[in-house]
Amino acid sequence: MKKEIEDLKQELARLKKLVYRDHLTGLLNRRGFEESINMAIDQYNSSKSNLTPRRGYIVNSLSLVLIDIDKFKNLNDKYGHPVGDEVLKHLSAATSKGTRKNDLVGRWGGEEIIVGLIGAELKPAMELAKKIQKDIIMSKFNPEYTFSAGVASLDKDINSFSKLYECADLALYKAKRLGRNRVELYSKD
């Protein structure tokens, strides 16, 4: 009976990994990231309403970093998709290495990595993105690649994941427009 219970626990863990993890990078997939970030945002909104959460922790700030590999299609066209996969794995590892245990790192889409920095304001979030850029350059990964990133934080007007994502995405597109290989903060202007 004990063995059967242990086998069931292992199978449950395996199935959870399939449901919430990206098979290529090992990062959270879109579903896993959204569920986790929404729990953190609920805690943030509860703490702003002077409610004490019964479970979990109090989140007093949260920033989102949206990373997009520059000219990823060109990399795939020039070197092939297996090399593109290696670039994605390299960026995923560099991003995960730069984050803390309670931060969330996920593969959002094709060449997009998303980072939820729980307890981080805009400036530390921007510094993290720039550090990851520097680490990638210093790694001398072949082929060389760059990324652009957009950063946004929760506040009284940005209090849902959809709004937070929209703001980080606007900042990302600003980084792309201004020449790529840069990090931009969301501003209401």
Image: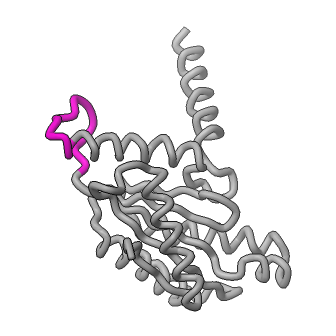
**Which image quarter: residue 104?**
bottom left
For residue 135, above or below residue 25: below
Residue 56, percent from left and from top = 27, 37
Tell me the residue at 54%/24% (across/down): 9
Residue drawn at the location 46% of the way across and 65% of the way down: 167
| Residue drawn at the location 38% of the way across and 56% of the way down | 103
Which residue occupies the foreground of this view, 57 or 18? Answer: 57
Residue 78 vertical position relative to residue 20 in the rendered view, above or below:
below
Q: What stretch is highlighted in magenta?
A: 47-59
- In front here: 170 or 56? 170
Kindly indicate the quadrant of the structure image that contains residue 109: bottom right
Q: In which quarter of the image is the N terminus?
A: top right
**What secondary structure do most residues of the magenta stretch adopt?**
loop
Residue 146 place in picture, x, y as percent = 60, 84
Foreground residue, 143 or 75?
75
Q: Does the magenta stretch include residue 50?
A: yes
Q: In this view, does 7 lie above or below 27?
A: above
How many numbered marks appear?
Answer: 0
Q: Where is residue 55 in the image (x, y as percent from the top left)?
A: 26, 31
Q: In this view, does 70 lie to the left or right of 57?
A: right
